[in-house]
Amino acid sequence: MARIRLLVAGAVSGAVLAFALWGGNGRAARRRRHRLVGHGHHLRGIARGVWYRCCRRHPDVHVDDLVLADRIRSTLGPVEHALDQPRVHVSVYRHVASLHGDVANHYAAERLVGAVRSVPGVVDVSSHLHVGLLAGDGCPSDALGR
């Protein structure tokens, strides 16, 4: 009896999947396929991340400067958003990161430098951040009309 239930459940799920992938040629069918493929990619990324953490792997610290600069920019994005700061320019030479740009206060500058220091592969940080925004400059949220 359990085999029959399992067989029926597999057949029903296969029929639903087949309908979602090949059912119809209209706009709704394309949206279903696109959404299903997107969910599949998302779940695959989550599974890879879980596997990466379960294996206790760490990012390689011996990467070239361009990859390290991309890692730094990826790390700084959420910090800049949380601090409501304009983008900071990042350059890396021999694993030493240089930061250029304007920040609103010393706290923001220290948070950005601390975030860069935490990136695996960064040997040192050279901060050329100017504290205090000019009159014409503003925070990204100022453009929203708040």
Image: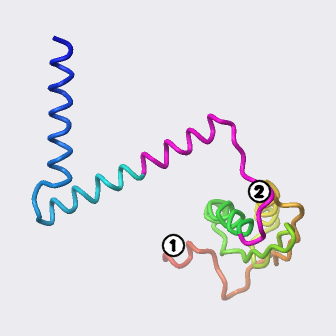
Give the total of numbered labels: 2
Residue occupying the point 29% across, 52% down: 36
Closer to the camera in the image, 28 or 110: 28
Give neighbour class at mark 1: few <14, some 14-19, many 20+ (Cα, 10 Å): few
Q: Amino acid at mark 2?
A: Val
- Dominant SS type (magenta): helix
Looking at the rendering, which quadrant does residue 127 occupy?
bottom right
> Could you tell me residue 63's position as x and y percent?
77, 62
> Could you tell me residue 23's position as x and y percent?
12, 54
How far apart are the alpha carbons under marks 2 and 1? 33 Å
Tell me where the magenta segment starts and ends, as one range.
42-66
Q: Amino acid at mark 1?
A: Arg
What residue would you read off at disc 1? 146
Residue occupying the point 73% across, 80% down: 133
Looking at the rendering, which quadrant does residue 97 occupy?
bottom right
- Asked whether the beta carbons under mark 2 and mark 1 sit within 8 Å of each other, the answer is no
Against 75, residue 20 (above or below) is: above
| Mark 2 or mark 1, whichever is nearer to me | 2
Residue occupying the point 65% across, 36% down: 55
Earlier sequence position, callout 2 versus callout 1? 2
Against 85, residue 7 (above or below) is: above
Give neighbour class at mark 2: few <14, some 14-19, many 20+ (Cα, 10 Å): some
> Could you tell me residue 29's position as x and y percent?
16, 59
What residue would you read off at disc 2? 119
Against 80, residue 55 (above or below) is: above
Is residue 144 inside the magenta stretch? no
